[in-house]
Amino acid sequence: MNLVEGRTSQGEGGAGDRTVALPVDHTQAILETTKEVGAVLKASGLPFALVGSVAVYAHGIPVRLQHDTDFAVRREDADAVTAALVEHGVRIVDPPEDWLVKARSGGENIDLIFSLAGRPVTAELLARAATLPVDSVHMPVLDPTDLVVSRLLALSEHHCDFGPLLPVARGLRERVAWARVREETDGTPMAAAFLYLLELLDVLPRREDAPEHPSPAPRPPGPVFTAPKNGYPRDNETRERGTP
């Protein structure tokens, strides 16, 4: 087996050859970039908070980091933030979206976000962030409740993967104000479905007004098949008629 740049190659020719892509673990590289950017933002004195998967990691949830590192900043601070990063050698990339600025450093992507799931980043949101260690650098990390709210509000009919959210909800459940989560996500079907799933999985206590757990649907009446005889399946009706 040869491991080259995250790929596994099996076989040396013939129809059995195949190459399988392995997911690349960027955890340490992303953490190094996060520390670099976090140190620059702390020195600038501008308010910010770590968000996204790296924030989940900082809260102690074991996740694999593969894509980028995200920071929430106020829109009015964007120019000052980007100027501070450029001064320290971070390359700024102008994206087509108007709710973030993209950057690159150390081969990793950085997102400076002004709006979380359609909601502007505010001074109140950033003030709720707690200072936590990210590897060896302390920096503000988004509050667990705000983290869950932003994740749930980002769900849509085109992007509704509960898989990555389940370990986050399980790991943070004692630190999340679930009443506020329900209030702030009220009226969003995907969030309601996820919260109901957490109740079914006993991650959250059931609400008094929640519907009962669904029972298995009864089987429709019909012939009961038994093990095949002589290569032909038989059911109750054919057995009674003596049909082979």
Image: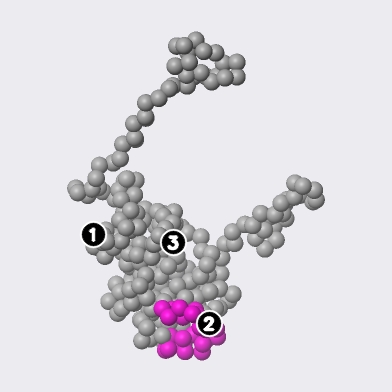
Q: How is colour applied across the structure in the image? A: one colour
Q: Residue 76 placed where, x, y %?
A: 36, 86
Kind of residue sitting beneath label 1: Ala
Above or below 114: residue 166: above
Q: Is residue 244 magenta?
A: no
Taking the image as shown, residue 6 lies to the left or right of residue 114, namely right
At x 42%, y 89%, the residue is 80
84 left or right of 129 in image? right
Instruction: Residue under label 2, please give it.
Output: 93
* CB within 8 Å, label 1 to label 2: no
| 237 to the left or right of 148 | right
Residue assigned mark 1: 179
Label 3: which secondary element: loop
Magenta residues span 79-102
**Does label 2 or label 3 sit earlier along the sequence?**
2
SS for callout 2 = strand
Residue drawn 45% across and 65% down? 53
